[in-house]
Image: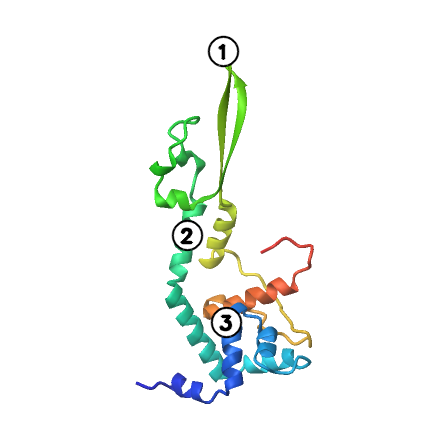
Amino acid sequence: MITQKDTDFETLSKRELLFCLEYCKDYNSTRAAIAAGYSVKTSYSIANRLLKKPAIISKIDSLFSDIKRTCMISVVGIIEQHKKIAFSSIANLHNTWIERKEFEQLTEDQKSCIQEISTKVLKVKTDSGPIADVEYVKIKLYDKQKSLDSLATILGFNAPVKTEITGKDGHELFPNKLDLSALTDTELITLHNLILKARPKDSSPI
């Protein structure tokens, strides 16, 4: 069955289709315009114009949906991964406050929360006199607070913040009262990239 979106795709030029493909790589519209063969000098304005065309927006949404299906990525999957980290505890990796569990005894969820395992061997003098090698193991989990913050953002628990994002020409790219729930995944990622570009270089990362 041919849909309206399918017919829209047919109206795109080869250069516009290439722009869509390049844009899905890193969501950098200016770079995508240059890679598609548009003028370097006018790539910024051309990219903005292209992203306002319904047929191009539909194509990008379709490509992005294909990427998510191929990689089996979904919002629910992302939430599940953040939930594992957000509610993880180093205590779950130990039998007692001193004795830790063997790695093979850990569940897959517990293993997925481990960012790094490092070991160090120290020579320690025993009560009986001789010096023995003692191995110390340090386990570092992924940042719980970052995952909690991400969950709060994804689920909409944070209070709305009025944010104005403008382009190089000073025109507002998004309305003052931005309803994030109304945005597509592609638009959310584009918004995130724009915020990153607008932040001062010495500011903390998002």
Relative image position of residue 68 (x, y in whole percent): 40, 66
Q: Which residue is mark 2?
A: 81
The tag earlier along the polypeptide, 3 or 2, is 3
Which mark, residue 24? 3
Q: Which residue is mark 1?
A: 127
Give the residue displayed 40% in from the left and 71% down from the top.
Answer: 66
Name the kind of residue labelled 3 in the image.
Answer: Cys
Residue neighbourhood size for the residue with mark 3, other residues' Cα within 10 Å, grouped as few (<14), some (14–19), many (≥20): some
Q: CA distance from mark 1 to mark 2?
A: 46 Å
Give the residue displayed 53% in from the left and 73% down from the top.
Answer: 23
Q: CA distance from mark 3 to mark 1?
A: 64 Å
Name the kind of residue labelled 1 in the image.
Answer: Asp
Seen from this angle, which residue lies furthest top? 128
Name the kind of residue labelled 2 in the image.
Answer: Gln
Q: From this viewpoint, is residue 154 visible?
A: yes
73 sits left or right of 126 in the view:
left
